Amino acid sequence: MFQYLLIETDEKYPEILALYERNQDFFALSQSSAVTLAQVDADVHAGPENLAPENKKYFLITDDNETPIAVLDYALGYPDDQTVFIGLLIVDKIFRGQGLGHKIVAEQLGHFRSIGMRKVRIAVLDNNPAGLTFWQGLGFEIIEKNKHSTDGDLVHVLSYTL
């Protein structure tokens, strides 16, 4: 149903930027400026310090017709060897409400389990109640409230045991 295109070059950046631009509501939660190709590049390459480059994954997710529907970013083995940290999941707003986000996460949870991961974590912005509801609806539980992220944003850290 979904194709996960691992982003390793800038070839797909324009498609990712277009998806970002259609989803300004998400970016407005944490920044005041417009999204740019430089931000796409930063998102593709950003990750926790000391993370092995091969453990940083950024995907453009498309349907069978190669229509971009979402982006997914995660770090394998962070903050410990058996945990995956999802840094970003944006389902294009033109596809929201169809259960695609739930399906993407379900597929990824199965994948993470199959490669030996035991937990998944995510940080949800404090001012994103829809995001918090989404992740809690999938069984993620808050383990830390009102924590400051590395970007200085106030977040809730959620965890899911595989």
Image (cartoon, rainbow, N blue to C red):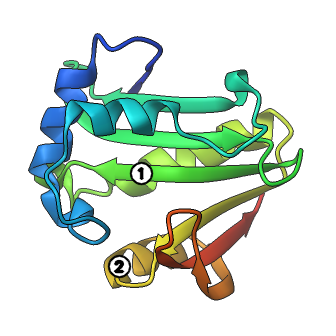
Q: Residue at x 44, y 41 (%)?
A: 72
Front residue of 57 and 152: 152
Give residue 134's quadrant in the image.
Answer: bottom left
Q: Earlier in the sequence, mark 2 or mark 1?
A: 1
The reply to whether residue 67 is in sight is: no
In the image, is residue 155 above or below residue 64?
A: below
Separation of residues labelled 2 and 1 (CA atoms): 13 Å
Res. 89 mark:
1
Q: Position of residue 49 (x, y in %)?
A: 72, 43
Name which residue type carries label 1. Leu
Is label 2 in a helix, a strand or a loop? loop
Q: Residue at x 63, y 75 (%)?
A: 157
Q: Residues within 10 Å of mark 2 (few under 14, many from 20)?
A: some
In the image, is residue 145 above or below residue 48?
A: below
Res. 131 mark:
none
Q: Residue at x 86, y 39 (%)?
A: 116
In the image, is residue 111 above or below residue 81?
A: above
Name which residue type carries label 2. Asn
The reply to whether residue 52 is in sight is: yes
Give residue 9's quadrant in the image.
Answer: top left
Front residue of 57 and 67: 57
Q: Quadrant for the C terminus, please.
A: bottom right
Is label 1 in a helix, a strand or a loop? strand
Q: Residue at x 19, y 65 (%)?
A: 32
- Name the side, left or right, on which 16 lies relative to 129: left
Res. 128 mark:
2
Q: Position of residue 31 (x, y in %)?
A: 26, 64
In the image, is residue 121 above or below residue 11?
A: below
The single residue placed furthest to the bottom in the displayed view is 145
